[in-house]
Amino acid sequence: MLTMEEALKQHTLRFAAGEIVKGTIIEVRSKEVLVDIGYKSEGVISGNEFDDIKTVKVGDQIDVLIEKLEDKEGSVVLSKEKAEFKRNWEKILNICNEGGTVAGKVKSVVKGGLVVNIGVEAFLPASQVDVIPPKNLAGFVGNTYDFKVVKINQERQNIVLSRRELIEQERTERRSKLLSDMVPGDIRKGTVKNITDFGAFIDLNGLDGLLHITDMSWGRIAHPSEILKVGQELDVVVLDINKEKERVSLGLKQKLANPWDNIESKYQVGQKVSGKVVNLVPYGAFIELEPGVEGLVHVTELSWTKRIAKPADVLKAEQVLEAVVLGINREEQKISLGIRQLETNPWDRAMEKYPPGTKVKGKIRNLTSYGAFIELEEGLDGMIHVSDISWTRKINHPSEVLKKGEDVEAVVLEIDKTNQRIAVGMKQLGEDPWSNIDKFYKVGDLVSGKVSKLASFGAFIGLQHDIDGLVHISQVSEDRVEKIKNVLKVGQDVTARVIKIDKAERRIGLSIKAANYTAEQLEAERAVLDALRPGEDLVALQHAFDAAHEAKDKGKDE
């Protein structure tokens, strides 16, 4: 039979630090629980070790681990969690070795992740909580999930979990099933996962599909964010499936009828329509008539008369305007529009209003190298070619006789409606003096005039009736003249004799030295002129003026 001393010794050996024993709850306090383990003093367990201290009842039996047999107050320090951890450790090791899955309850948030109770405390990194790392980890505390054990350290007795791997595994299984079941034309529910410039990725509950921006709406949209938001749920149409690459193309606009299918019934050629300017390009403006239907107003269809360089000069984005339908091509989904057709084409009335022979008045609007433009009315210009300014003068540039803004009169010569051109002339206001030249001048007449131009071969003399005569250098003086500018100056008054008239070439030959010649002498001089080489003759006025300019420039150089 054991002595009292031996019995106490055995009892003390049974209660040692690190041992797991059964205990009975004898009191529940606000932050701790008292447990009787049959030792000489009660044990204390922190209330944090219970899921809910309010559910703990006196008389409940639990397994506890003895941390200390006696603290400063003489109480036994116990741990319910450590007892569970020690009993579960073997079980957890088996699960890890098998790559198994365990259920656990998220206990708290710690730096870098979450603490999960799976029978023992384990660590769940933030990156392994979900497929997309959550911004608010606190929302997971208190929830129970399945986890995969990915790492265990036996020496430190800690475990690393992953919820993400299980989710990805589940998604892979769902993705395979979706790819096998899905066919083009299906309508599937999805959630907007991500938005880019070119479209949006839609989560189809395990499989991501691309909803391209061009398949979002029949109308024009600049960016997917105009109609979609991340997290938004929507129904989409399956357009195409690539099972090998696991890619799915989705559509949103395909749920609605294509507005181009019955376009001819809604719009006819000649119909007046209203729309909004949605895009301006160098060659025209796109007008939205309805979502998904746009018409193009080409730059040439903006005005009957104005030359518009680019549409942005007269139109603005978002501007609402009217236009006329010019053409419809359903196959190419194109509608041609015109704005100028809203007004009467002034060229339709031009032939009636300005028939050839009509005298007109207007301001010189512009000068070019080949002529001048005179404004007949708003939007209608007439063009005066340099050859139609004067019957007698060779005009190289209209600025020699005309100025921008000057009021002039002219006569309509021709109307070209197809090319929208009106030719007018100033010289036609008067009679061509060369048609009656015999009435004005005869060979032998003594005439007076001013030197108008100098050339290397002679001088031009301005006569009456706006006609120029040419004094060849050989007809200036009895003495030999080396350079015409040495004996004559522009503006100088001279008297000369008409010694030659050539109607065909529209030339008048003059002689200053023959002013006092007899008829016989004049005939002799004319014979001399007729014998001159072509380059030395009186020359056509056109070549004479050109030579005069060359002589002038050469004189400056000398």
Image (cartoon, rainbow, N blue to C red):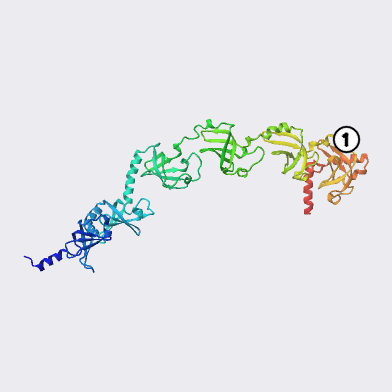
Q: Residue at coordinates 34% horizontally, 46% vertically from top-left?
A: 171
Neighbours of disc 1 within 10 Å: few (<14), some (14-19), many (20+): few
Residue 530 visible? The answer is: no
In the image, is 257 to the left or to the right of 335? left
Is residue 500 toward the left or the right of residue 273 in the image? Answer: right
Image spot of residue 155 (x, y percent): 25, 61
Evaluate whether residue 14 shows in this view: yes
Nearer to us in this view, 285 or 231 = 231
Asked which secondary structure carries label 1, the reply is: helix
Determine which quarter of the picture holds residue 381.
Answer: top right
Write the residue at 81% across / 43% down. Answer: 536
Q: Based on the displayed image, in which of its 4 quarters is residue 383 positioned? A: top right
The residue where tag 1 is placed is 439
- Left/right of residue 238 with respect to residue 405 in the rendered view: left
Query: Where does the image place residue 311, in percent across and percent down from the top left?
Result: 61, 42
Residue 415 vs residue 137: left or right? Answer: right
Quadrant where the N terminus is found in the figure: bottom left
Q: Amino acid at mark 1?
A: Lys
**The C terminus lies in quadrant:** bottom right
